[in-house]
Amino acid sequence: MSEPTLSTQEPDSEPAKHVPPTGKFIPKPGVFVPSAALLILFVVITAIFPTKMGEWIGKANSTVVGDLGWWYIALVTGFVAFSIWAAIGRTGDVVLGKEGDEPEFRLGSWFAMLFAAGMGIGLVFWGVAEPLNHFNSPPPGTNPDTAAGHARTAMDITFLHWGLSAWAIYVVVGLGVAYAVHRRGLPVSIRWALEPVLGKYAHGFIGDVVDVIAVLGTVFGVATSLGLGVSQLGAGLDFLGWVNDPSKWVLILLVIVITACALVSVVTGVDKGIKWLSNINMVLAVVLVVFVLIAGPTVFILTDFFTQIGSYLRNFLSLTFDGRPYEGEAGQAWLSGWTTYYWGWWMSWAPFVGVFIARISKGRTVREFVAGVLLVPTLVTFLWFSVMGGTAIYREMYQGGGIIGEDGVDTNTALFQMLDGLPWPAITSVVAMILLVIFFVTSSDSASFVVDMLSSGGNPNPPKWSRAMWASMEGAIAAVLLFVGLTLQETDPDANPLGALQTMAILLALPFSIVMVMMVVSITKSLLAEARSAEVESRKWLAERVAKHINDNDMVDKS
């Protein structure tokens, strides 16, 4: 008798009953109709009443978002703790698949795809801008005495926002979906990851609500990324002298053009569209970061990269739990504009990224899954910020500055100003803008595919027209919210033109955060059940071995 392995937990119902026919679009009325209706209604109302919507979003930001900091801090900290718990001990041995399933992708390919999932518009947009913002204006309550102290604080906070905490959010959703799909044979849908908790209610109205929340969060999360990308793209065009001070209508036109590119990728299919675009983007991203590493202060960057990892790990707990309660309104405003925004943004992206990670992780153990998802993308993003942000901070500290102006950091142009101090700035700026466009095109294509699966009950091959509809919706949401933000900025120059996009991302993440708490409970319940089953099997195996040994000894004695 061989050593027992963790047993497969049987699903509560027959998976085949839930799976729609492949290739045929059969929308799930309880998900598709309300999701599409709510998004269309939002676009229409916002387009007709941009000022009123701007005022409402502003009130929501000051009254609701400002009060979410403690909740998101507690939640994200819990996700990190859960991820570590799931990886250690016997639960880490559970295979995300049937017994005997081998990993679908080789380790190198799997790491490369995790790397791809960790890249995006956000890294291009914030790679220089965030460290410089914190360097120029440290968070309230932080009083470093020297420029070096400012720099260390800036990189610590940046690493917090893009490190283990962010990827622990994706671990929760990715692990829940991977367990339901690969281990239990259920279709791709958020609701089935909650079936151990919801039971029969996962099949009905409550399950529909869960998937609707996931759809809305994904659409608004991708729309926020498009808003960031378009703002920086407009700044790049202005920097290169191609378009002088782009107006809000030029930015809206850029949204339309990029969305049209995403639609072309959608209709050409994954193999011909997103596959080669992703490959091109990966090469461009590597070329850009290697170029800056070599052309910039190489030794300083590499030294700071390893030093900063130690600083991040040393200060992780104090950074994670810092809700800035003694800094008053300034502290709460900073928290809602940075940390709370980031946690909400990651949660709004979690259904999309989680499903992607789950899809490529069949055959991995829970321990491999958690270690890979937490560590690989985190190290990649740390390297990106060390290269991009480190180069910019080095220039401000040791080369006379020039990026931080009298009015502070121009977030949209910071990347191009940093590249302007290196060789061939025009070429590298064009590369950065191409990265922004392709990142959105590939993200929109993939996110539309995920949303389409959710709205059709887990159909693994939904038709292109419905994917095109969701991609168009992402562009429309980005356009109207960007229009609202730019309209408010015309009357209030200090207003953040991306404020409406950021606020909506945080608000939509709030209901999904409840779903994620339920997902943690569901995964914990399932993993503990498997661990108990494995323990029983192990004891049974040990008892049989002991009994056999005793019988063998008795037979020897009698002989």
Image (cartoon, rainbow, N blue to C red):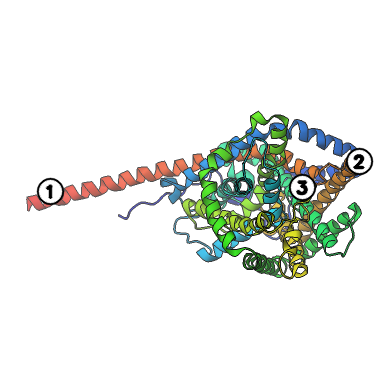
Q: Quadrant of residue 319?
A: top right
Q: CA distance from mark 2 to mark 1?
A: 94 Å
Task: Judge from the rendering whether residue 297 lies leftward or rightward of residue 263; answer left or right.
Answer: left
Q: Quadrant of the N terminus?
A: bottom left
Residue labelled with disc 1: 554
Give the amino acid type for the residue marked by disc 2 in the picture. Thr
Q: Is residue 558 above or below residue 519?
A: below
Task: Judge from the rendering whether residue 128 lies leftward or rightward of residue 241; answer left or right.
Answer: left
Residue labelled with disc 3: 408
Residue labelled with disc 2: 491
Q: Nearer the viewer, mark 1 or mark 3?
A: 3
Q: Find residue 480 and report its horizontal and vertical position in percent.
A: 86, 47
Q: Secondary structure at mark 1?
A: helix
Q: Find residue 88 and report its horizontal and vertical position in percent.
A: 44, 46
Q: CA distance from mark 1 to mark 3?
A: 86 Å
Q: Nearer the viewer, mark 2 or mark 1?
A: 2
Q: Find residue 363 and report its horizontal and vertical position in percent.
A: 50, 58
Cβ–Cβ under 8 Å for marks 2 and 1: no
Q: Is residue 199 visible?
A: no
Q: Secondary structure at mark 2?
A: helix
Q: Is residue 481 visible?
A: yes
Give the amino acid type for the residue marked by disc 3 in the picture. Gly
